[in-house]
Amino acid sequence: RAPPKQEQSRAKYCLYLLCAIVFLQVYNAIENLDDHVLRYDLEGLEKTLRREVFGQQGAVDGLLFHLKDYLSTYVHNKPLVVSLHGPSGVGKSHLGRLLAGHFRSVVGETLVLQYYVLHHCPQEADALRCARDLSALVSETVGRAEEEEKIPLFVFDEAEHMHGEILDALLRLVAAERSNEHLNAVYLLLSNGHRHVTRHVLHNSSGAAAGRQGSLARELTPALRDSLGELHPLWAEAELLPLGLLEKSHVMECFLEEMTREGFYPDHANIERLAGEIEYYPEVGGHAYSKTGCKQVVAKVNLL
């Protein structure tokens, strides 16, 4: 007599079905990840920053890392707040303009706000009104971005001059308990933090300590966070990225870029002469750091 056929367990088919569902979900998540990254053209942004920002490789790497991590998805539990600190002329505002220009090209003009504190709210007596207007403008922008399923960018230059009322308003905007649309936004704070940065760079510019761009943020962040925390709790919500002093070679790169843009022949001897007219700190460890970065470059090229 033939043995009875064994019944196959239905659980096996359920397991196959479950595996297929998980695979499709993972595949879909990867596709969505790629779509988000491609939407913001971060490769193009990286090429632009590396081509046009001189002497700030560590800060550029840090900024790109935070942007790639944040923009890879549309679901967040808090907005991305990045704070750039450095002496005058080292590229903070330039970097902010490049980032704003890039975002305008990928998300649209209406989803990018550049706020210059000394221009938009110069009088302390108007600080409360400015804070209300800014909150309304940011809320309107993030609401529009939510409808379009995009992430807006807010750039605040000269942040060290912000009045307390504006800082309080920004802190409320970036707080995690805000509504969902407020969680999908990028805030870039640009401020002058020259005291800590200058002292650190000049004291660590000899021997093996020189040229360690990547270690600047790691070594300076604790001191910056303590110092900024005394000013306002807003900076406790931010990722801090210090920008170091620029060397003479970086200033020469600035002159080369500006002269090429203005149509002048980039003669090396002329560039070196112009760079020599910039004021520098006393040479430390074979490095000459500019006191004003590249801030005087445009004015000097305009005199040619």
Image (cartoon, helix red, strand yellow):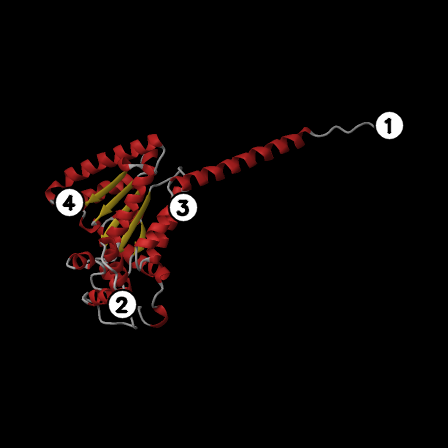
Residue 124 visible in the current orientation: yes
Amino acid type for the residue under numbered disc 4: His
Amino acid type for the residue under numbered disc 2: Leu
Amino acid type for the residue under numbered disc 3: Asp
Amino acid type for the residue under numbered disc 1: Ala
| Foreground disc of the pair 2, 1 | 2
Badges 2 and 4: C-beta atoms under 8 Å apart? no
Q: Earlier in the sequence, mark 2 or mark 1?
A: 1
Measured Cα–Cα span from mark 1 to mark 3? 63 Å
| Position of residue 300 measured from the top left corner of the image (x, y, whole percent) | 17, 60
Q: Earlier in the sequence, mark 3 or mark 2?
A: 3
| Foreground disc of the pair 1, 4 | 4
Residue where numbered disc 2 is placed: 202
Label 4: how many residues lie within 10 Å, few (<14), some (14-19) or many (20+)?
few
Q: Is residue 174 left or right of residue 273?
A: right
Badges 1 and 4: C-beta atoms under 8 Å apart? no
Residue where numbered disc 1 is placed: 2
Measured Cα–Cα span from mark 4 to mark 3? 32 Å
| Position of residue 168 measured from the top left corner of the image (x, y, whole percent) | 22, 42
Label 2: how many residues lie within 10 Å, few (<14), some (14-19) or many (20+)?
many
Quarter of the view holding residue 274: bottom left
Residue closer to the observer: 152 or 18:
152
Q: Secondary structure at mark 4?
A: helix
Residue closer to the observer: 236 or 155:
155
Label ID, residue 69: 3
Assign the N terminus to one quadrant of the image. top right
Q: Earlier in the sequence, mark 4 or mark 3?
A: 3
Badges 1 and 3: C-beta atoms under 8 Å apart? no
Q: Secondary structure at mark 1?
A: loop
